[in-house]
Amino acid sequence: MSEHPVRLVLSDDRQRSRITVFFRALLSIPHWIWLALWSLVALLAAIVNWLATLALGRSPARLHRFLAAYVKYTTQFYAYLHLAAEPYPPFDGQDGYPVDLTIAPPARQSRWSVLFRAILIWPAVLLAAVFVGNPQGGFNSGRGAFSFGFGLLPLVALLGWFAIMARSEMPRGLRDSAVYALSYGAQFWAYALLLTDRYPNSDPLAVVPDLPARDDPIRVKLDADDELRRSRLTVFFRLPLAVPHIVWLALWGVLAWIAAIVNWLITLLAGRSPTSLHRFLAAYLRYLLHVYAFLYLVANPFPGFTGPAGSYPFEIAIAERARQNRWKTGFRAILAIPAFLLLSALNLLLGVAAVLGWFSSLARARMPRGLRNAGAFALRYQAQTIGYLLLLSDAYPYGGPVRDD
């Protein structure tokens, strides 16, 4: 696929000032006022741009430049607000900010796509809500039928705030997750404002610059031969087909969590997990992720019931047992709380990607690569978080997307 017309440019060094981070919300107030005023003008410009693009087949150059500057400014401000960047952002969306955008000049657009843009954009609205969240939702959706609460970007900022207060540095994984959300948001607004007719790309491997290749104790590797084809019949009945696995997973899960308690006590005393318990819990984790990959359309084949290594296209590699820090072991349940907070947002991403992928797979017999890779990112973090809690490793879950080398 050709490069997206809206690309994120990253030059952030992850160093943060504790004082500016502590007062980040207050420092952002002038930008909130300016953003509200600019948004009113941008809304009027967007309506004019829609009529002009419908008539001419492309966005007028002046309107395109104005709306592109608005999208750039919004991205820069949100990067500052959510701790993905450190310098105070300019008020005009000028080039050179550590989290910046390049937006291609006006190009021809399909008039049908322009005419029905308000309808076509709804799947992207669902994903954008996952990334940014609903400011009125909080943790409780209340009466709202469409409320996601905290999204990925606010949760990353919350966790990053505490990390920066401790270390004066934004963790790489959290920064990259914020960049992932910002990149999708920029593409979303560029599509909504008719700066391009390319649909937003949800693939973290394609939109986040310079992803690291990591050798974590718990890793995920996707099948390179997966052509993303999906059988319409098995996709339509995916949930009923998964019922036997869900039942077996629940039964196995009871034994696994009993084993996890025993494993915690022994690891706390001996400094490492017993070989038999490590193998048992590793098999459970592999099987859990095989089932989830099948259920959420990240992988296509019907999985086996025992979770052997190398048996499924969505492969979970778990390192052999190793010595673990007893302090980390003793307080593992408390230390895992931030990881589970982030996991709550990524699980929502996984669910929305699966729902959208379900409709796409029924229509095209193919899972979109962006949705598949977004789901795989969420499942990788889930594998590392559960593995961390089960004491399969004392390496903390890495909160950002990684390259699959």
Image: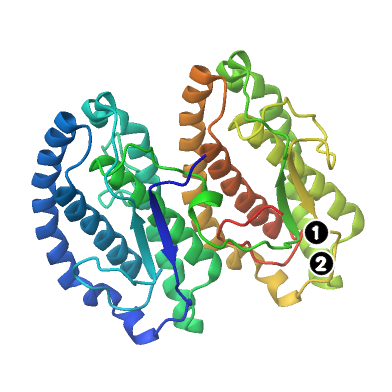
Give residue 396's position: percent from left, percent from top: 65, 66
Give residue 86's position: percent from left, percent from top: 37, 77
Count every numbered label the image shows and give the total: 2
Question: Is residue 263 visible in the rendered structure shown here?
Answer: yes
* Label 1 crowd (10 A; few <14 / some 14-19 / many >=20): many
Q: Quadrant of residue 334?
A: bottom right
Q: Secondary structure at mark 1?
A: helix
Q: Secondary structure at mark 2?
A: helix
Kind of residue indicated by mark 1:
Asn
Q: State whether residue 275 is above or below residue 113.
A: below
Tell me whether circle 2 and circle 1 mark residues in contact (CB < 8 Å).
yes
Q: Is residue 354 left or right of residue 95?
A: right
Q: State whether residue 384 is above or below residue 315.
A: below
Q: Is residue 286 left or right of residue 298?
A: right
Query: Which residue is painted at 30% across and 48% down in the image?
Result: 134
* Label 2 crowd (10 A; few <14 / some 14-19 / many >=20): many
Query: How are the colours assigned in the image?
Result: rainbow
Specify the farthest residue to the right.
275
Give residue 234's position: percent from left, percent from top: 63, 17
Q: Quadrant of residue 322?
A: bottom right
Q: Quadrant of residue 17?
A: bottom left
Which of 328 and 209 lies nearest the eye of the viewer?
Answer: 209
For label 2, the residue is 267
For label 1, the residue is 263
Q: State whether residue 125 is above or below residue 14.
A: above
Which of 190 and 293 lies nearest the eye of the viewer?
Answer: 190
Q: CA distance from mark 2 to mark 1?
A: 6 Å
Kind of residue indicated by mark 2:
Thr
